[in-house]
Amino acid sequence: MNTWEKELERALRKKFYEDEVKDILAYYREIIEDRKSNGESMDAILNDYVISDIVKAMMPEILMKRKNDSYLKISKSTKQLLILLLSSPLLIPLGIVYISILIFIFSMMVVSGMLMIGSLTTFVGFLLDMISSTLDIQTVIGLSGFALMMFSMLMLISIWLFKGMMMVANQLFKWFTKIANKRGETI
């Protein structure tokens, strides 16, 4: 049992976070102890639980429960979901749709980054042009204030776009995980 449990823990650590590993291990310990108390031999019990099958079976359920509150967590969870979707022949079309949507979301995130960079360089260039112009001071201040307002609006739009795409990616992750879990149960 100890060897099997250590192998299971090692396999789970490759895919899941620490708290998730503890929950899965506790779940299987309880199942094994129940079967053991019913008189089954340890070898017969452990033969029923193949470690790779446990990891694969727990993936959709754990992904559905996972809180993806940072970009790193979302990207790791998305990678795991893609592997899950593309590893099952019946889920490959779903994986392809998910990849297509992710490409759009990623491109919108890149657009928001480029919008930030573009607005910053335009604002700096405009200010340098105003400083070297022959306009009177009131006009320079007025135009600089207008440029600052436009710069601020573009920065807000790009930040909202990025955050919006992160929320959409997180929601899509939840939907596709639920769909994969439901399809996995029917297979």
Image: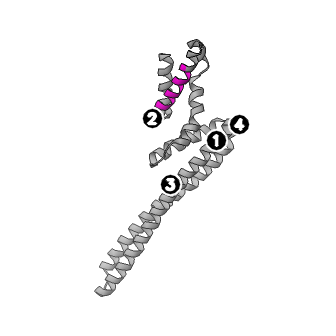
Of the image marks 1 and 2, the number of the one nearer the N terminus:
2
- The residue type indicated by label 2 comes to Asp
Q: Secondary structure at mark 2?
A: helix
Report whether 9 appears left or right of 142.
Answer: right
Report whether 10 appears left or right of 146.
Answer: right
Identify the residue under disc 1.
180
Residue interval drawn in magenta: 21-33
- The residue type indicated by label 1 comes to Ala
Magenta stretch secondary structure, dominant: helix
Identify the residue under disc 3.
166
> Which residue lies at the image location 65% right of the left edge and 46% below the top edge?
96
Identify the residue under disc 4.
186
Crowdedness near tag 4: few (<14), some (14–19) or many (≥20) residues, C-alpha within 10 Å: few
Of the image marks 1 and 3, the number of the one nearer the N terminus:
3
> Which residue lies at the image location 35% right of the left edge and 79% below the top edge?
145
Q: Secondary structure at mark 1?
A: helix
> Which residue lies at the image location 50% right of the left edge and 54% below the top edge?
166
Do the numbered discs 2 and 4 sit on residues whose CB atoms are within 8 Å? no
Do the numbered discs 3 and 4 sit on residues whose CB atoms are within 8 Å? no
Distance between mark 3 and mark 2 Cα atoms: 24 Å
Percent coordinates x, y for residue 2 in the rendering:
47, 17
Identify the residue under disc 2.
19
Distance between mark 1 and mark 3 Cα atoms: 21 Å
Percent coordinates x, y for residue 129 in the rendering:
34, 77
